[in-house]
Image: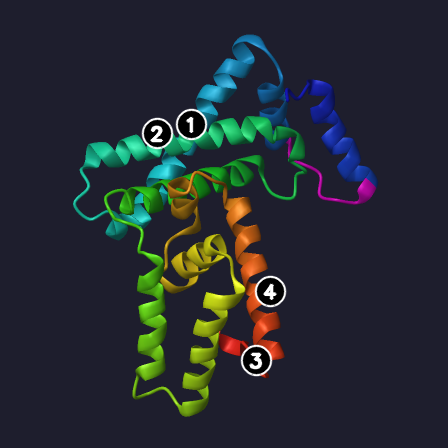
Amino acid sequence: MVVTVTDAVAVRQTSLATGDSSPDAESLAWIEALSGAGDQREDAIERLHALLVRAARFEIARRRRALAGTRSGELDDLATQAAADALMAILRKLHTYRGDSRFTTWAYKFALLEAAVKVRRRAWQDREVPLEQDGWARLADRRASPDTDAETAELIGAVHLAIAEALTPHQRTVLTAITLNDVPIDVLAQRLSTTRGALYKTLHDARKKLRARLAGDGHDLGHLW
């Protein structure tokens, strides 16, 4: 969707009419330039991309420990990719900017998010996603721990049984990968060729089933999930 200059002006008019914060002059200039055409738009895109690259590099540097051993050239590539993806997302969602913060602050968030996703995916690139059984074994270990009281051990056992009997194979895979094996949801989405939204829906449905099953058996899922 291409946002026109008229749309950009409408942003300010809508904000004023609803009592929301009105975009500052610099932010409006960004919106108008990015919503335009020709050299003005290309120049704005180039400046915005440079800003996004700096934001992505900052976030990648902050998460550097997760990428131990990764060459600096690869980190630069990740930052460039994150900035490019952030730029495309911003241009698609330009019409949603309402001036609650400065445009550059709003845009920075896209770069930080994309960089974080890229870091997580790169950190898991050469790692195998843990199998469903690995998560079950971890659940069993928690039940057998000497620090686990009898009531908690009983609840963990009930959760183990409910996972096995109440969930579909796909729900078990998603639940154990995310909640027991700590696989980042965007990494799992990539491995399963699906979307984050679809996985969130699966996770929500799985937890709902578990709670219903445990409540029916007289248990409260409580702090476990």
Q: Are marks 1 and 2 in contact (CB under 8 Å)?
A: yes
Q: Which residues are magenta?
A: 18-25
Give residue 147's quadrant in the image. Answer: bottom left
User: How much space separates mark 2 and mark 3, taking CA atoms?
Assistant: 47 Å
Residue at the image point whose x is 44% and y is 85% from the top: 154
Q: Which percent across, then down, holds residue 144? A: 31, 83
Q: List the residue tagged with mark 2.
A: 80
Residue 19 counted in the magenta span = yes
Residue at the image point whose x is 57% and y is 51% from the top: 201
Q: Which percent across, then down, holds residue 161? A: 46, 73
Q: List the residue tagged with mark 4.
A: 208
Q: Secondary structure at mark 1?
A: helix
Give the mark, 4 or 3, whose residue is nearer the N terminus: 4
Q: How many marks?
A: 4
Under mark 2, the amino acid is Thr
User: How much space separates mark 3 and mark 1, taking CA atoms?
Assistant: 46 Å
Residue 103 counted in the magenta span = no
User: How much space separates mark 4 and mark 3, taking CA atoms?
Assistant: 12 Å
